[in-house]
Structures are given as C-alpha cells and as structure tokens.
Image (cartoon, rainbow, N blue to C red):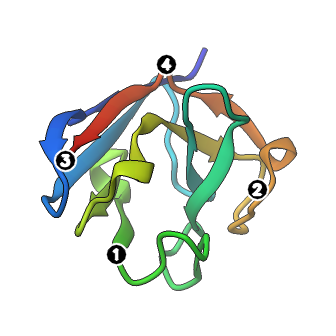
C-alpha cells in the first residue's frame, strides 16, 4: 500500500514562504506524475500544481503561477511545493497525490493515491 506523507505546513504571515514536502513510501514515484491540491475551509478541493515523471512538464493553477514552484527528487521519492509571497487566500490543507501515469494532470480523477494533508495558514 503506497503512503504519501506531507510535511512543512504551519502558520505563516502574508508575504512569507513555505516549502511543503511529500515523501512517498512503499512505492517508487519514478514513472508517475505527482500533483499538489488544496482545500480551503468551506470550499472544494482544487488543483495547485503538477509535474510529470521526468520533471520537464509542469502545470500550475493560475492563482499560484509565478509564486509556487513544484519539483521532485525521484531518488528520494519526494515531491516539493515551494510557496512564496503567500496570501491570506492560500490558507488551506495541502494534499500531494500520485498520478495514474506519467503525465502531469489537473483533475483529481487522474490521481490514485493521496496524502493526509498539511495545513498551511496564512495570517495578516
């Protein structure tokens, strides 16, 4: 059974930076796309960023483009989300997920394993 464990969240001030990590256990992430999603209170989960298996195809949601950076280290079975210039509206639980294949995707249905989430709270 694959396991995804996010870490790095917390309480930060607006304008600050945070880096989330997602370590995948029991299965290699090589060959699979990885993605980050988030869910704010009272809202549906939404796409944030995705990276294909080799790291040369990356997609971002418009709301985070230019501020967030997704990256991966296949040797460490780890995916990262660097979040800069955080805004109050970035407050959410952030989830990493493994894709069903190698292609970066924006829809939840194309991910088949999820972490438990990491809370990021941005304060003014």
User: Which is in the foreground here, disc 4 or disc 2?
Assistant: 4
Count of labels shown?
Answer: 4
Q: Which mark is residue 124?
A: 3
- Other-residue count near label 3 (Cα within 10 Å), few / some / many at <14 / 14–19 / ≥20: few
**Nearer-N-terminus badge (1/3):** 1
Q: Which residue is mark 1?
A: 67
Tell me what residue is drawn at x 56 percent, y 27 percent. Answer: 41
User: Which is in the foreground here, disc 4 or disc 3?
Assistant: 3
Tell me what residue is drawn at x 66 percent, y 30 percent. Answer: 113
Helix, strand or loop at disc 3?
loop
Which quadrant of the structure image shows residue 9?
top left
Q: Are marks 4 and 2 in contact (CB under 8 Å)?
A: no
Helix, strand or loop at disc 2?
loop
Q: Is residue 35 visible?
A: yes
Q: Where is 61 relative to 65, above or below? A: above
Q: Is residue 107 left or right of residue 85?
A: right
Q: Where is 92 relative to 68, above or below? A: above
Measured in 3D between alpha carbons, the distance from the residue under mark 1 to the one under mark 2, in whole angstroms, is: 26 Å
**Nearer-N-terminus badge (3/2):** 2
Q: Which residue is mark 4?
A: 116
**Nearer-N-terminus badge (4/2):** 2
Residue that sits furthest to the right in the current view? 109
Which quadrant of the structure image shows residue 40?
top right
In what quadrant of the picture does the N terminus appear? top right
Q: Which mark is residue 101?
A: 2
Measured in 3D between alpha carbons, the distance from the residue under mark 4 to the one under mark 2, in whole angstroms, is: 21 Å
Q: Is residue 107 left or right of residue 24?
A: right
């Amino acid at each position: 059974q694959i396991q995804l464990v996010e870490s790095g969240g917390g309480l930060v001030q607006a304008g600050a930076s945070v880096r989330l990590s997602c370590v995948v256990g029991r299965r290699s992430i090589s060959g699979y796309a990885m993605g980050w999603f988030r869910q704010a209170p009272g809202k549906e989960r939404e796409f944030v960023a995705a990276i294909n298996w080799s790291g040369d195809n990356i997609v971002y949601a418009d709301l985070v483009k230019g501020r967030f950076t997704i990256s991966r280290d296949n040797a460490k079975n780890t995916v990262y989300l660097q979040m800069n210039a955080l805004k109050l509206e970035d407050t959410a639980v952030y989830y990493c997920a493994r894709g069903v294949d190698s292609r970066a995707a924006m829809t939840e249905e194309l991910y088949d394993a999820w972490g438990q989430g990491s809370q990021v709270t941005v304060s003014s």
